Image (tube, grey):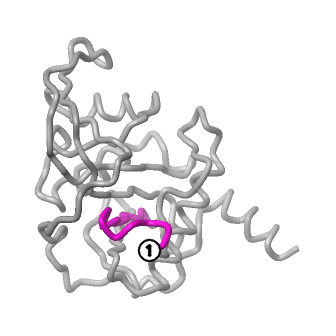
Amino acid sequence: MRAHLVAHHEWEHGVRLRQLGAFESVGRIADHKVLLVRPSSPTYARIRAERVSRRSIREPIFEGGYDVPQYYADERFSPRVLNAHALLVARESFGVGILVLERRPVIQHYRWTSRPEFELLNSIDDLVRWSIAHIWLHPKVRGQGIADEMVRVAAQGVCETPDTIGWLSPITRRAFHLMARVTVDGFHRAVQDLPPSETVTRPFVQNPSRAR
């Protein structure tokens, strides 16, 4: 019974984050906090991020839903080589959005012709780049430009732009429209293959501030 009540509450309001001090604050979007979860973040923060990811997959597939979470707290299900980071959007103490960043091979560069129409500009070999693997917002906070700002915060945090960061395929209809809004000239397509092991630049310079 309790599990059913929790699931219903999360469906209506988002995931209760409770211990906001466990998260690293990296900015604000309007009245919402943007919280960062690194692989080195406290276990509690990673588990809560996975919970938000699990809430997101309850959306219908045609609305951008998935069969499995796109972020895991346990590295056994999220290979270390991906260096997965999550950005959470918090409305008060509820997680209402998530963006997952991973290191992925980028294989193609496209440019816009007539948005959202595009054409292949060139193929790319041997390039691994920070890529947006998943982005989701609770229905109650959609249509406010939050997703656009999440992309900009994520790209800035890894020293990229929306044009140069990778976008993991397959890409949903909603994602294409998001990409068309936030990019200037085009986008880079990333793929599901695991990247080779490599030393990567630390994303999001350590911010000593914490959510309160």
Q: Quadrant of residue 56?
A: bottom right
Q: Is residue 203 left or right of residue 65?
A: left
Front position in the image: 109 or 30: 109
Q: Quadrant of residue 185?
A: top left
Q: Indicate the quadrant containing the C terminus: top left, top right, bottom left or bottom right.
A: bottom left
Return the residue at label 1.
Answer: 75
Residue at 19% from the left image edge and 80% from the top image edge: 207
Q: Is residue 128 left or right of residue 67?
A: left
Front position in the image: 115 or 200: 200
Residue 103 percent across, percent down from the top left: 26, 57
Residue at 30% from the left image edge and 65% from the top image edge: 81
Residue at 52% from the left image edge and 68% from the top image edge: 50
Would you place residue 164 above or below residue 116 in this image? below
Q: Is residue 88 magenta?
A: yes
Residue at 28% from the left image edge and 28% from the top image edge: 180
Looking at the rendered structure, the secondary structure element under dot 1 is: loop
Would you place residue 118 above or below residue 22 in this image? above
Residue type, numbered disc 1: Glu
Residue 133 percent across, percent down from the top left: 38, 50
- Which residue is the extreme one toward the front? 196
Q: Which residues are magenta?
A: 76-89
Front position in the image: 139 or 129: 129
